[in-house]
Image (cartoon, rainbow, N blue to C red):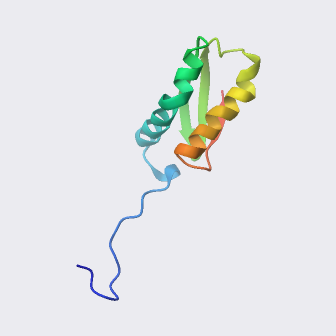
Amino acid sequence: MVKKGSKSKVKKPKDFSELPLDEQVRQVNEALMTSVFPMLGSHGGGVEIMDIEGFEVKIRYLGACHGCALAGSGTLQFIEQTLQAQVDERIKVVPV
């Protein structure tokens, strides 16, 4: 029981940019698995996480996505919006 006037010692979740890289990658992959990977896979493409620096997620397009005209616009926006909604609203996705 918490006494009146005492401060709670509940730990605040770490900011995404402060998490260890393996935890950042896990969270990003988990978010991508639900909608992005299946959608890209159905068109013969895919995406791979290359690196994460702060809130910048660097990706590489695979298969049919590599060189596709939509990869730099609609697909990129879909990936970024998915990660912003499910992981952290400050994430920016950069193709490399």
Q: Of 17 and 33, which appears nearest the observer?
A: 33
**Residue lying furthest left:** 1
Whether residue 23 sits left or right of residue 47 in the image: it is left
Q: Is residue 84 above or below residue 31?
A: below
Whether residue 16 sits left or right of residue 58 in the image: it is left
Q: How many marks?
A: 0
Q: Position of residue 63 (x, y in %)?
A: 60, 11
Q: Of 39 and 48, which appears nearest the observer?
A: 39
Q: Quadrant of the N terminus?
A: bottom left
Q: Is residue 42 above or below residue 8?
A: above
Quarter location, residue 23: top left
Q: Is residue 61 above or below residue 32?
A: above
Q: Quadrant of the C terminus?
A: top right
Q: Position of residue 61 (x, y in %)?
A: 62, 20
Q: Residue at x 60, y 50 (%)?
A: 89
Q: Residue at x 57, y 14 (%)?
A: 42
Q: Residue at x 49, y 55 (%)?
A: 15
Q: Position of residue 10 (x, y in %)?
A: 34, 68
**Residue lying furthest bottom:** 5
Q: Of 2 and 59, which appears nearest the observer?
A: 2
Q: Position of residue 27 (x, y in %)?
A: 45, 40
Q: Residue at x 44, y 56 (%)?
A: 14
Quarter location, residue 94: top right
